Image (cartoon, rainbow, N blue to C red):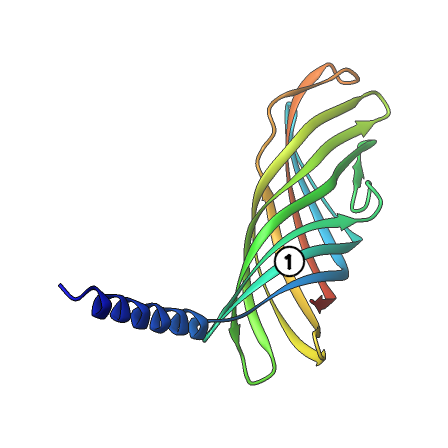
Amino acid sequence: MDFKRIRIRIFILLIAFTDMAYSESLDSNFSVKLGYGLANYHNEAIWSYADESARDGQLALAAIGYTKKFRDFNITGELFTFIGPSDSGSYSTYNTVYRTSNIWGFNLNPEFKINAESVGYLKVGYAFAKSQQADDYGYVDYGSIQGGLFGFGAKIPIAKDLSIGLESFRIGFSRTGPAYSSGWSKYTTNKSTVTFSGVYIIKYF
């Protein structure tokens, strides 16, 4: 058996595999994103009756990400958080204020080219938050909530390693378990939904 020829063939195959892998994975980048937009907060509470409420608020968005570039598409992973007052988007009815605060999460964005410059993408992920409700008679802390995220967006470059974009996504948090309201002497559950639409600037490194 000619081990020299076998080693040469293995070496050639490794070179070919490396070249193919490089051609399929062209480049990778870390990124920092800052955004600003409107958030619609929707709450669905159940006491002895159903009580739904909604209100718009303003929030900033901060995210760090990593983009893996392939020949025909990219995939970006992001870790994000909202920045703003904890009562942004709260709603008051019957002296009751609902709040969804400390929202953060992660998402994956499969990206595709719209044309030579612009890129469109989908957003899928998972988010976490805190949920509270307060009124003149008591306070209810629903604790941590979590739920799935889905949305879409688009971006265009404005300089080397710098792009601007817009995106919209919705987080549907799971319904909380019963929590006791001392003011009303009742147990209640709550389900929060947050829809965010805004613009952003993103820097690649």
Q: Position of residue 66 (x, y in %)?
A: 61, 59
Q: Position of residue 185 (x, y in %)?
A: 73, 14
Q: Which image quarter holds the N terminus?
A: bottom left
- The one nearer the camera, 77 or 102, is 77
- The one nearer the camera, 9 or 84, is 9
- The one nearer the camera, 24 or 202, is 24
Residue for point 72% across, 61% down: 32
Q: Amino acid at mark 1?
A: Gly
Q: Is residue 18 above or below residue 89?
A: below
Q: Position of residue 123 (x, y in %)?
A: 56, 58
Q: How many numbered marks have been drawn onto this rendered protein structure?
A: 1
Q: Is residue 59 above or below residue 178?
A: below
Residue for point 68% across, 78% down: 157
Tell me if 21 is positioned left or right of 121 in this view.
left
Q: Given the current orientation, which residue lies at the most extreme bottom position?
A: 116
Say which residue label 1 marks.
65
Q: Which image quarter holds the C terminus?
A: bottom right
Q: Is residue 29 above or below residue 144?
A: below
- The one nearer the camera, 107 or 54, is 107
Residue for point 34% across, 73% down: 16
Q: Position of residue 195 (x, y in %)?
A: 66, 53
Tell me if 68 is positioned left or right of 104 in this view.
left
Residue for point 70% across, 74% down: 161
Tell me if 90 is positioned left or right of 124 in this view.
right
Question: Which class describes the residues within 10 Å of circle 1: few (<14), some (14-19), or many (20+)?
Answer: many
| SS type, badge 1 | strand
Q: Quadrant of residue 72?
A: bottom left
